[in-house]
Image (cartoon, rainbow, N blue to C red):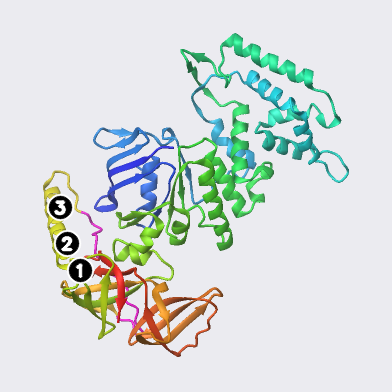
Amino acid sequence: MPEIRLEHVTKRWGKFYAVDDLDLVIADNSFVTLLGPSGCGKTTTLRMIAGLETPTSGRITIGDKVVFDSALGINVPANKRKVGFLFQNYALWPNMTVYENIAFGLSNIKEDLPKIDFEARNSARLAEILSNPGEVVKVLEDCRDKTGKIDEKKAYIKLIDAFTISLYTAKKLYGYHLESGKDVSAEAAALREKAESAKKAQGLNDHFEAVQNGQPVLEVRKLTREEIDLSVRRVSRIVKIGMFMDRYPAELSGGQQQRVAIARTLAPEPSVLFMDEPLSNLDAKLRLEMRYELQRLHVETGSTFVYVTHDQMEAMTLATQICLINNGVLQQYDAPLTVYNRPNNLFVADFVGNPSINFVEAKGAQRGDGAVELTVFGGQKAVFKPARPLDLSGWFQDRDDRDAALAQEHQRKAAAKGFVEKGNKDETFRYHIAKVEEEDLSLQEEPVLTNEDLVLGIRPEFIDIAEGGALEGEIYGAMPTGMESTIKVRIGDFLLTGVVFGSTLFTIGAQVRVDISGENIMLFDRKSGKCVAFGSLEF
């Protein structure tokens, strides 16, 4: 499967930038989720790779083929990119059976395909199966009904799955009635001789393809009924819908319809499979089951999956890599646990995780030993100890240098012909500080920030209720789920969300002692929103 590469890809409408200067490499055989809030540019990115949307500028490469380049004027149509697209709406034809829905796209394919002697190939395959009739009999015996009669329809399906053959070959095989004990050695020998004779006479290879100068001969043609049926049966086995082939979409559940839509997308053997929120129409239980199915499907097909969602749970559980986007700008591209434990900025930390991360505003400065002395919770003293050596003043200097370089680059671009100023400005993420009495931030003036203004990010699992805890708190709310309880603890005017594992019951208003543990406490720069360091917190 191919690697996908996006270089400086931009899509804008007027001054609105849906995607802004996106650089992205999607590795071969990866499962990448495009994650972010509604309107952030996820679907637009997906549609540009698939060829359903034309970028304003940039370059897109799938494998070794450039499918879009604004500078060179290249824009390969969607149907030539060898990709599959699974939409949010299953878009199944209601007047067609499951089989017809899957086969519909295959019947319209017309491209360079190997020239094959299908009669010889089928004869060889049938001879191979008949050489071991006992295996066929075992399959047929499993298809008997209560009266002892073989269910013909069931037999076809079983033979197709057992021997990876088409329906047409299965019908021929069934027609020998091997369950009666008939000797078919002569028929098998005749079929084998027929296949070998055709192979020698036409110079066919082992796949019964015509060969010229050592290479298969290609011809522009449509797929044969045999090829279509083999493809349909192949994908039906993958998504486990072989028993539904004669049904209509209205006779299927939501999960079954989803499987049909997936099968239809997989049938042409796309090199890349794109999915745009395909599980959003399913109920919670079915959505969970389909996540497992998509994981299995990714492994079995070996394809590259690119999956759009705004559901962070789907992104965390399905993806090998998460591409988190906000306002058309790439925020972080990493493995799910890296995005969770090592977020680049306040936005990433807030968006990923359920329950959400706790943000605590802090003021402080670095000591000579490298630790950072902080004032939190309206006067509480704390010490942040970085996990790795930290030069805070050096970090701030690098931040200012980067900001100056970006401003200079912006001025250079602004002077260039054809430059369009971005209307939807990238603003620093407004993080939420949970308080008992919420403040209306719209009425407050923007504060003047200094290098002493910092933000702590504390995941809920780092909030501990302990007898010897350093902080005094009060249970403000509790939601037990059996395995765990999500609690809100009041510390002064502030609220912290914690997750306590076990079946402990908490009483609203109860006084408790609280500790903040763990080595992954995050320290953010309040001015830029970027993560400065990870470490532990002591009170």
For disc 2, the neighbor class at 10 Å (few under 14, some 14 to 19, many from 20) is some
Q: Is label 2 in a helix, a strand or a loop?
A: helix
Q: Position of residue 118 (x, y in %)?
A: 62, 21
User: Looking at the image, which residue is at 54% across and 43% down?
Assistant: 300
Of the 4 image quadrants, the one containing the C terminus is: bottom left
* Rendered image quadrant of residue 322: bottom left
The magenta region covers: 422-439
Amino acid residing under circle 2: Arg
Q: Which mark is drawn over residue 410?
A: 3
Q: Position of residue 185 (x, y in %)?
A: 78, 20
Amino acid residing under circle 3: His
User: Looking at the image, which residue is at 71% across and 27% down?
Assistant: 129
* Rendered image quadrant of residue 8: top left
Taking depth in this image into account, of 177 and 218 the one nearest to the observer is: 177
Residue 477 seen from this side: yes
Q: Which residue is mark 2?
A: 399
Q: Position of residue 492 (x, y in %)?
A: 33, 87
Query: Vertically, is 196 above or below 345?
Result: above
User: Looking at the image, which residue is at 79% across and 41% down?
Assistant: 142
Q: Earlier in the sequence, mark 2 or mark 3?
A: 2
Q: Which mark is drawn over residue 527?
A: 1
Q: Earlier in the sequence, mark 1 or mark 2?
A: 2
**Is residue 225 toward the left or the right of residue 410 in the image?**
right
Determine if the magenta segment contains residue 425. Answer: yes
Q: CA distance from mark 1 to mark 2?
A: 10 Å
Taking depth in this image into account, of 232 and 377 the one nearest to the observer is: 377
Tag in front: 2 or 3: 2
User: Looking at the image, which residue is at 37% across and 58% down?
Assistant: 338
For disc 1, the neighbor class at 10 Å (few under 14, some 14 to 19, many from 20) is some
